[in-house]
Amino acid sequence: MKEAFFLLVSGDPETWGIVWRSLRFSFFSTLFALLPGIPVGVALGVREWRGRRTLVALLNAFMALPTVVIGLLAYSLISRSGPLGFLDLMYSSGGVVFGQAFLAFPVVASLTQAGLAKLDPRFRETLVTLGAGPWRRLFSTLYETRAVLVAAVVAAFGRVTGEVGVSMMLGGNIRFSTRTMTTAIALDASKGEFERAVSLGVVLLAVAIAVNVALHALAPREAS
Amino acid sequence: MKRLVSLLLALALGSALFAQTPATPRLKLATTTSTEQSGLLAYMLPVFEKDSGYKVEVIAVGTGASLKIGEKGDCDVVLVHARALEDAFMAAGFGADRKDVMYNDFIVLGPAADPAGVAKAKTATEALSLIAKSDASFVSRGDKSGTHVKELEVWKASGVNPVGAAWYKEAGQGMSQVIIMADQMKGYTIADRATWLAMKDKSTLKILSQGDAVLFNPYGIITVNPAKWPSSNYAGAKALMEFMTGPKGRELIAAYKISGEQCFYLYK
């Protein structure tokens, strides 16, 4: 514990580099999961169509898939011997972000869908009656369900910040390049450096709390 | 709509910033856990990076996994220690060049109380037979690493097939982790000397058997075949190979000690 405190206060550049890198990876992968995740969630949430339920069930299943399985799937795509090998993402920061976005996408899509499905159908009818166009309707709907969207972001961010399978498999735990808090903890623990491992664990906890507090501060108090 | 466009623009900008290529070409080295966990690479590579301008990214896994990564073209060069696997890798055309780098030895570790009486054994095979006959646990890497390959070779010579026995624990972990596990279980294990030197202050285990010729542990460096993977960094791989086996690399390896003890030795 003393060591944890010392490492951070002393501003050990490698430790802070790892913390900062983890945050950067999580930020970008959450972002890249939101881009397709929200539209897909909207498409699945606003009205009934054929095959919708099957897709929702599939998304929920992906949400529960172990990170190493997602890592394996992403690995088979981005390895130089895979279809996206030409992108040269394997064992790079891009590879970790790719895999983590893959991991977070079902979380975003599924939670967005669930939030929209719970919306009172009269809300949409009212918008139509008021003469709102399709874009206007979409933004109003998203605004109305913003509490759910924040929850989706929190859940996605939590899933990618806390995972070790994808980062280890696609990043390779390369020092100064793809070593994140979780892979550093795994490495330190495997080397018997338990003090360092615990210290990073404490940082991880602090980051998780800070992010959740910040995001919840943005969320409206009166959940719809 | 305008806001959406500016958001997308900001995103594209952000990702461009994020994906910037480093100023120096990246070189990916897949290697056994011992070269990394002993601290040798952290000590040698900065010198190479400074001299050559390459930036080496180390993926520390077992020898088996390193060769697999090389086979799939996901690294440029491998530094491993399992001669039979290395020769098969070369024969299959996955590697372009191979050179001997250094060697040290494997050692049999166990609790100071030594319930199996391994310290009296004259050879490594005898040591393992004694462990098999006792009630003590043996922790195996179980991960196709160079150490695991060597361990299985010694078991085979001893005539015991330990796989599946209750006292035989296949951990599937790196060397340091296996040393910690053996310590916790008051059991035995086979380790490479370099990792042991880096770990011994944190462990209550003792070296109980060493010096048998079968425990010889040679390390080799192999460049990934550019004919198979044209996008691999062959020039960088070759430069690292020349550095590790050249005068400067040899000087560094010879000078590398952990708490006063020599970690790796050079060929004459």
Image (cartoon, grey):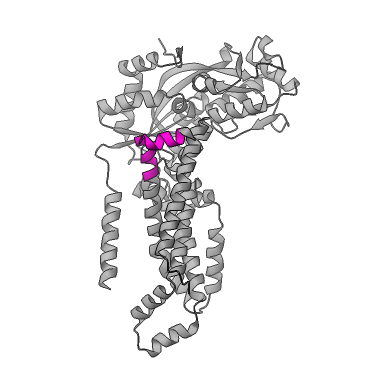
Residue A184, compared with residue A60, is above or below; it is: above
- Magenta region's main secondary structure? helix
Picture quadrant where residue A172 is located: top left
Residue B123 in the figure: left or right of residue A222: right
Asked whether residue B201 appears in the rendered view, the answer is yes
Q: Nearer the viewer, residue A160 or B156?
A: A160
Residue B90 in the figure: left or right of residue B119: left
Q: Nearer the viewer, residue B168 or A210?
A: A210
On whether residue A156 falls in the magenta region, the answer is no
Residue B222, compared with residue B265, is above or below; it is: below
- Give the residue at x 72% y 29%: B167
Q: Position of residue B139 (x, y in %)?
A: 64, 28
Q: Which residues are magenta?
A: A3-20
Q: Position of residue B66 (x, y in %)?
A: 46, 34
- Give the residue at x 50% y 46%: A165
Q: Position of residue A162 (x, y in %)?
A: 49, 49
On whether residue A13 falls in the magenta region, the answer is yes
